[in-house]
Image (tube, rainbow, N blue to C red):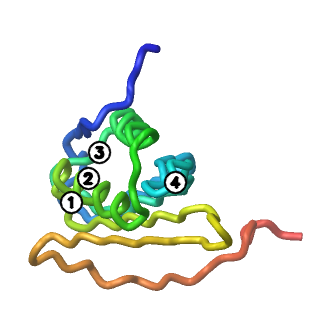
Amino acid sequence: MTTQPNKTLETFPNPNPGRDYHIHMEIPEFTCLCPKTGQPDFATLILDYIADQQCVELKSLKLYMWSFREEGHFHEDVTNRILDDLVAATNPRFMRLTAKFYVRGGIFTNVVAEHRKAGWQPAPFVELSQFSTQSNTRG
């Protein structure tokens, strides 16, 4: 195998650090093990962040996520650990990690963890009019 799981998160310089912009990633194949039973737990992770000076590099993120496959973690633990590691690597203005674990014993678990850089405030949200699909076609 040419690549192996790895805990190293690589970064690259934010191409536009003068602007707050939303980076959204979905990781639908996250797997770790239940620390009680050793059975696999599956989740979709949703990462939303506003970078400051660094962005996370995608291949390293994939290998990082893969590194949890053989580790036992409670849902709350692994969600916060991943957020802490991403924050340590990128030092973002804002970061939110949502972990949506699949059903186990009839229970779905969602864990949401957030980080805000000290002093950072989001710009006010601008509500724009919505246009229907293909609103420019005449018929």
Disc 2 designates what residue?
A: 86
Left or right placement of residue 107 versus residue 133 in this view: left
Left or right placement of residue 68 versus residue 82 in this view: right
Disc sitting over residue 37 in the figure = 4
Task: Tell me the mark number nearer the camera, choosing from 3 and 2.
Answer: 2
Left or right placement of residue 131 versus residue 134 in this view: left
- Name the quadrant containing residue 49: bottom left
Contact, mark 2 vs mark 1 (Cβ under 8 Å): yes
Contact, mark 3 vs mark 1 (Cβ under 8 Å): no
Identified at 19% across, 42% down, the residue is: 13
Disc sitting over residue 56 in the figure = 3
Identified at 51% across, 47% down, the residue is: 31
Give the vertical position of 61 relative to 137 (above or below).
above
Lower sequence index among marks 3 and 2: 3
Whole-angstrom CA distance, mark 4 to mark 2, is 28 Å
Whole-angstrom CA distance, mark 1 to mark 4, is 35 Å
Label 4 element class: loop
